[in-house]
Amino acid sequence: MAETLDRMTGRPNSRTILIVEDDEVLRMVLRVEFEKNGFNVREAENGSAGLTSIVEMHPDAIITDIEMPVMNGFSFIAEVRKADGQADIPIIAISASKITDVAAKAVAAGANQFCEKPLTTKNILAVINAYLPPDASPAN
C-alpha cells in the first residue's frame, strides 16, 4: 500500500487504522473521516480479510464490527490477540447488535472498548485518539 499524504499538512500520514466492517457504506464514511484526520486507512469486509490486512500493514489501531460473514468480530479479535506482535494494538469493537452483553463479550474477546452503532465520526475519532500516543496522533 502506498503511503498517502495528509490533506492539511502535505506530510506523509503517520498512523494507520484498519476498519473491519461488512457494511461498505459505513467503511467508506469511516475511511473518509479518518483520512481527513491524517490516517492511512485499510479496509476489510470481514474478520478473515482483516487478519490478512494486519499482516500486510501492521495497523496502529483497529475498528471492527461484531456481526460479519466469514469470521465474526469476536473470533477476529481473539485471533488478533493471539498473533505475535499484535497484542497491544488498540481494538475498538462496534455493533448495532441486540445480543445480550455484546459489549462485555467483545471486551472479553480482547477489545479495548466497545461502541454502539449508530456511530458519530467525531466520537469514534475521539475513542481511537484516546488509545494512540498523544505526540503521534494525527488529529492533535
Image: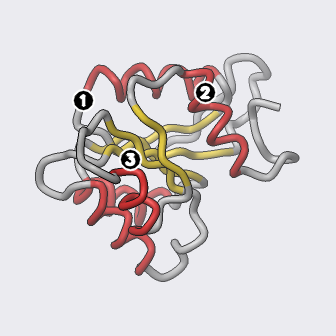
Q: Earlier in the sequence, mark 3 or mark 2?
A: 3
Percent across and percent down for residue 89 are: 57, 63
Q: Is residue 56 left or right of residue 52?
A: right
Name the kind of residue labelled 2 in the image: Asn
Residue 123: image tag: 2
Q: Is residue 29 left or right of residue 87?
A: left
Taking the view exactly as shown, the residue that stands out farthest to the front is: 100
Which-is-in-front pick, marks 3 and 2?
2
Q: Are marks 3 and 1 in contact (CB under 8 Å)?
A: no
The residue lying toward the viewer, choosing from 77 and 140, is 77
Residue 64: image tag: 3
Percent across and percent down for residue 85 are: 54, 78
Q: Earlier in the sequence, mark 3 or mark 1?
A: 1
Taking the view exactly as shown, the residue that stands out farthest to the left is: 70
The residue lying toward the viewer, choosing from 115 and 53, is 115
Residue 23: image tag: 1
Tell me the element at label 1: loop
C-alpha gap between disc 2 and disc 1:
19 Å
Looking at the picture, does residue 50 appear above or below residue 19? below
Q: Earlier in the sequence, mark 2 or mark 1?
A: 1
Q: Residue at x 43, y 48 (%)?
A: 93
Looking at the picture, does residue 54 appear above or below residue 124? below
Tell me the element at label 2: helix
The quarter of the picture where the N terminus appears is: top left
Name the kind of residue labelled 1 in the image: Asp
